[in-house]
Image (cartoon, coloured by chain):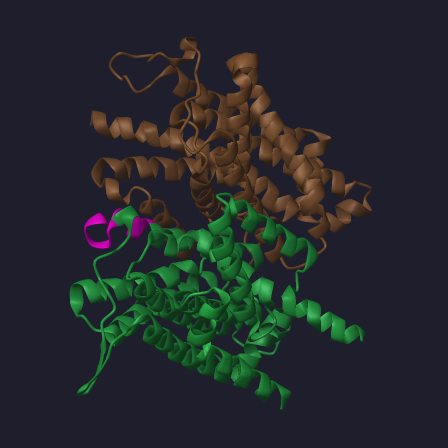
Chain colours: A green, B brown
Amino acid sequence: MTRVLSIGAIWLALVGLPWWLPLIGGYTALGSKILIYAIATMGLNIVLGFTGGLSFGQAAYFGLGAYGAGMTLKYLAPSTPLAILIGTLVGGIAATLLGPLVMRRRGIYFAMITIAIGQLFYFVMVRWNEVTGGEDGLAGFSRQDIHLGSLVIPLTATNYYYLVLICFTAAVAVMWALLQSPLGHTWVAIRENRRRMEFLGIRVERYVWAAFAVAGFITALAGTLNAMLFNFASPQDLHWILSGNFVIMIVLGGMRSFFGPLLGVIIFVVAQDYLSSVTGNWMTFIGIIFVLIVLLCPKGVLGLFARRTEAA
Amino acid sequence: MELLLFNVFNGLIQGVFYALMALGLALILSLNSVINMAHGGFLVIGAYLAYTLQPYLGFWGALVAGPVLAGGIGLIVERVLIRPIYSRADPLYSLLLTFGLALIIEDMTRTIWGPQGLPLEIPDIINSPVSTEYFFITGYRLFVVGITAAAAIGLYLLMRYTLLGIRIRAGTRDLETTSALGVNIYKLRALNFGFGCMFAGLSGVLAAGILGLTPPMGNSLLMPSFVAIIIGGVGSLFGAVLGGLIIGVAAGITTTYYPAASEAVIYLMMLIVLVVRPRGLFGEEGLFE
């Protein structure tokens, strides 16, 4: 019951965000960015936190989604839903195709291969100048108003936030349903004891593959939304630095918890936004945050609370 | 033909840097079980310290001091930051920790030495072309290849014939048994981490002589070194070196025919290796699988 109430409270706070965020010095686009990163990290957490696969190259699928959406708007058709659809498919299918290469690996080797594969897409986007805009990124497209029959919804900053919120809610519902299903329980069991699952006759590799593919689709969805938030897709969207940021956001919030990544994203994005406005050395501070989280609170903010209540 | 030769040679030099980086990474990966994301940072530290010390020590002194200091800083980092988290079974944490370090080092380098590129002066004796026909084969480039070969052979002899090397190899196989046999594995792992960082530093000083010094130079060499290890095979030092040289030359050849794909090609090669021979050229079967 408390769970339902707290989820309801979070959701109401998100619905009202365009009203209250400016009051405390934020802006609506920051809210959109937080939700977008929350989609991406919660998707990644299916592999990372629930299946136990150290995917460290997730930005690749985020970026593929971003470029997929941008190119759809720029070269194919000026339609926001189509851009979301195609971008999500591009990133998700790439993850699905590459899954078999990583699904057998474990631990650090899984991490190393996922990082390196991510760099392939980075260099394709940076060097394929005529189509992708190269180092400067893909610009020259913008999100289009949504046409529902005769009804036209203009995608202002606030309306776009609500579109992102709808996508967020849908993604959360899908992930929640998956994690409650036998598939989700198998993922957690693989994380807890992979060898035992193998002995039980479970085809562990296929389940890891499934987790990697689902995470790819959801991260790509976030990427498409990110591209249309800024009307811009940057090679940095595919860079391993962003992959690392995704992982630290998850760890910061709490990787064993469904909504943990959302909390981590809020703290990280707000901190990054604030730090980059007050100091040129914000990268150092982000780095220090990484080191401190690892040394002092490896279970994340939610982990801290969990320990308190256990002790009490 | 001349262009191809030029690019192959350039690629070979690039591959030498990848190989040196990969060698250090592979050492740390196998004994410390850490993917050192800050390896590029140690490369930058070695290069910039050599640049700073050069006016006092001369080129040769700096060539020694840079890598040694990078190794020394590696020892401190290992003691203060890495050692407390060896006990955590999840490799995620060492990955994140070194990732944070990489950000700090790159940003600090930019603050201390400035974002613009700096040149590393090379003595004239080794900087002149050795052949008028093949102008690109300068003495320095041959020197780079020579030093790297010496370092790799030195490491091989160390691992093969000294007590320290035997202990490192034993620790890689089975850390617990090695410890039970009376080896101080904390000291061993610290030394090994320092060695790895020294190789990164050496790679930095040598690369600075050709590419110049920039704060992100280390991180741009880091990813190809991962690829070198994956292609060469995790767990094999020889594989790491060979992998580095292979991707360097492959990038060089691609530059001749299709320059835009010169970076992507090494990642494509990695994918092919992963499909055809998942454990890499010289990797051991079953490791990390």
What is the count of numbered marks? 0
**Does the segment drawn in magenta span residue A233?**
no
Quarter of the rendering containing residue B118: top left
Quarter of the picture holding the N terminus of chain A: bottom right
Q: Position of residue A71 (x, y in %)?
A: 23, 62
Relative to residue B3, is residue B205 drawn left or right? right
Residue B45 rendering spot, x and y as whole percentages: 55, 32
Which residue is the extreme one toward the bottom? A1
Say above or below: A170 vs A198.
Answer: below
Q: Which residue extends farthest top?
A: B125
Left or right, B182 with reference to B69: right
Name the side, left or right, on which B24 lies relative to A21: right
In the displayed structure, would residue B166 be above or below residue A184?
A: above
Q: Nearer the viewer, residue A24 or A212?
A: A24
Q: Which residue is drawn at the image coordinates 50% and 67% (left, top)?
A: A24
Confirm whether residue B35 shows in the render: no
The residue depicted at 30 percent of the width and 20 percent of the height is: B136
Magenta residues, dominant SS class:
helix
Q: Is residue A126 magenta?
A: yes
User: Magenta region: which residues?
Assistant: A123-133
Measured as percent of width and height from the top left, residue B11 is found at 34, 32
Residues A189 and A309: in front is: A309
For this view, does B234 lie left or right of residue A140? right
Residue displayed at 19% across by 87% down: A149
Where is residue B197? Give x, y as percent: 59, 35
The residue drawn where x is 59% and y is 75% is: A188
If the image is split into quadrants, where does the C terminus of chain A sit? bottom right
Q: Residue furthest front?
A: A23
Q: In the picture, residue A153 is in which quadrant?
A: bottom left
